[in-house]
Image: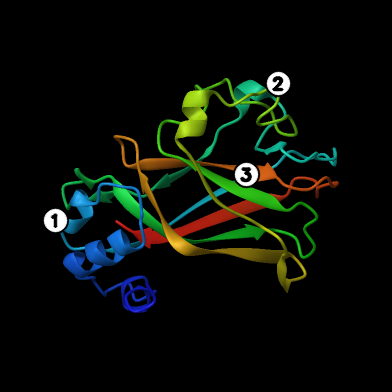
């Protein structure tokens, strides 16, 4: 796919891809999605970001714990990304999107937690108000993902190391060897959760920003 990706997935916001060429390239890559919505129109790059702040405590995370905005389960909300393509009248045109990369930014120069970024193509893996709390297991007895939720879960990738940008900021890029095909919900949104992939003590009240880039 390297013959197509540099021109299609580059950061030039004004550039548009030939959908026929893109469609053929993605089919060769074996992406399991109906790309009719993408193939029928001009493909455009998008950039979406979401930010949340974890609680003001230093309770240690275990592997598989949810990193969220609240220690009260009923107050936990997932990250939201408006990834679908809308027309000038704000009508949703295309729900089929391709995620090409993601960046996670932590508002500290020395993050201790290595998170996984999970995306969900529906209104979320849990009903509103029924997410597990921050620091609770995302997949265990206290907040087990349902079979239906797991069927629409897409793992973007795991942070294995952070790059320090300054004394108060670090980032990690999740570069996808194969772009991730996913369909948004009927409002054009994707939901995202961070899941701890190591056992460590976090920074209190740490703010995370997640940036998604792709095509829609």
Q: Are marks 2 and 1 in contact (CB under 8 Å)?
A: no
> Measured from the top left, where is residue 71 in percent x and y?
72, 29
Q: Are marks 2 and 3 in contact (CB under 8 Å)?
A: no
Q: Nearer the viewer, mark 1 or mark 3?
A: 1
**Marks 1/3: CA distance?**
34 Å
Q: Residue at x 34, y 36 (%)?
A: 185
Circle 2 residues within 10 Å: few <14, some 14–19, many ≥20: few
**Marks 2/3: CA distance?**
17 Å
**Which residue is more in the foreground, 125 or 32?**
32
- Residue 29, compared with residue 97, is above or below; it is below
> Measured from the top left, where is residue 87 in percent x and y?
18, 51
Q: Quadrant of residue 20?
A: bottom left
- Residue 109, compared with residue 201, is above or below; it is below
Q: Residue at x 73, y 49 (%)?
A: 206
Residue identifier under label 3: 194
Scheme of colours in the image: rainbow
Q: Earlier in the sequence, mark 2 or mark 3?
A: 2
**Can residue 47 be spotted in the picture?**
no
Q: Residue at x 34, y 79 (%)?
A: 3
Helix, strand or loop status at disc 3: strand
**Marks 2/1: CA distance?**
44 Å
31 left or right, relative to 113: left
Which numbered disc covers residue 40?
1
Helix, strand or loop status at disc 2: loop
Residue identifier under label 2: 142
> Measured from the top left, where is residue 166 in percent x and y?
73, 72
193 left or right, relative to 113: left
């Amino acid at each position: 796919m390297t013959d197509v990706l540099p021109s299609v997935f580059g950061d030039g916001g004004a550039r548009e891809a030939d959908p026929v060429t893109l469609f053929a390239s993605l089919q060769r890559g074996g992406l399991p999605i109906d790309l009719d919505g993408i193939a029928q129109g001009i493909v455009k790059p998008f950039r979406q970001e979401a930010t949340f702040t974890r609680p003001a405590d230093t309770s240690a995370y275990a592997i598989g714990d949810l990193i969220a905005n609240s220690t009260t389960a009923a107050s936990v909300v997932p990250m939201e990304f408006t990834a679908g393509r809308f027309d000038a009248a704000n009508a949703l045109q295309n729900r089929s999107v391709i995620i090409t990369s993601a960046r996670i930014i932590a508002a500290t120069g020395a993050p201790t937690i290595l998170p996984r970024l999970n995306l969900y193509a529906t209104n979320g893996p849990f009903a509103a108000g029924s997410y597990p709390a921050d620091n609770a297991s995302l997949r265990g007895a206290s907040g087990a993902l349902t079979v239906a939720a797991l069927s629409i879960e897409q793992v973007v990738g795991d942070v294995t190391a952070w790059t320090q940008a300054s004394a108060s900021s670090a980032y990690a890029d999740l570069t996808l060897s194969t772009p991730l095909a996913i369909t948004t919900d009927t409002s054009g949104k994707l939901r995202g959760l961070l899941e701890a992939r190591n056992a460590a003590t976090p920074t209190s009240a740490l703010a995370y920003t997640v940036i998604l880039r792709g095509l829609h």
